[in-house]
Amino acid sequence: MRLTRYTDYALRTLIYLGVHEPRQSSIAEIARAYGISENHLTKVVHQLGRLGLIRTIRGRGGGLRLARPPAEIVVGAVVRQTEEDLDLVECFGGGACAITPSCRLKRALGEALAAFLEVLDGVTLADLVEGPVRTDLARLLDIPGPSPSPAPSLPPGAAPAVP
């Protein structure tokens, strides 16, 4: 099975936004990070917004953000919503085939597709962007990291602990 470029871009956009959370991003930033066309990405972003996966804010200070927490975005659902056609072979879509009455391939391919989607149904965006991988993804996508935390303040006259 091969996913379309459209679905690939949708998943990449969600990954970028998940790593960049809680800050807003732009289509230009995402396109630049992946080296992909802004025009193609604009269409993808529009659909992700219609699907309720991202929130788009127009105008000055606008941008893109996830509309839901990463743990609530299931990869299998995104694939189903962005893939135009999951019919692996013509007969899945009702097309005619000379061997349909005796064919066992359709059943095997159907089971394979179901297994593929079942695995993706067990993966959330959080699984892809949270934990130690977040730092690696931010570096690879040239996303600035969070500001370092300020050192804890000491009470007046207290000396810092020496290890």
Image (cartoon, helix red, strand yellow):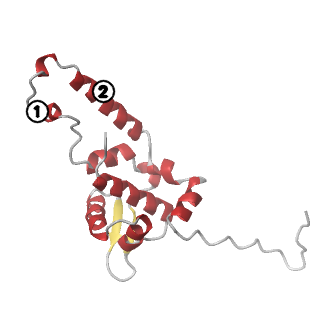
Observer-nearest of 77 and 142: 142
Residue ID at (18%, 20%): 103
Residue type highlighted by circle 1: Gly
| Residue found at x 10% / y 27% | 97
Q: Which comes before the other along the chain, label 2 or label 1?
A: 1
- The residue singled out by tag 1 in the image is 94
Among the 4 quarters of the image, the one containing residue 10: bottom left
Image-based side of 150 in relation to 86, left or right: right
Query: Could you tell me how far apart the alpha carbons at marks 2 and 1 are, in whole angstroms?
Result: 17 Å
Q: Can residue 21 be spotted in the picture?
A: no
Which quadrant, please, contains the N terminus? Answer: top left
What element does badge 1 sit on? loop
Q: Position of residue 73 (x, y in %)?
A: 40, 50
Provide residue 58's location: percent of width, then percent of height. 31, 76
* Residue 162 seen in render: yes
Position of residue 109 measured from the top left corner of the image (x, y, whole percent): 27, 28
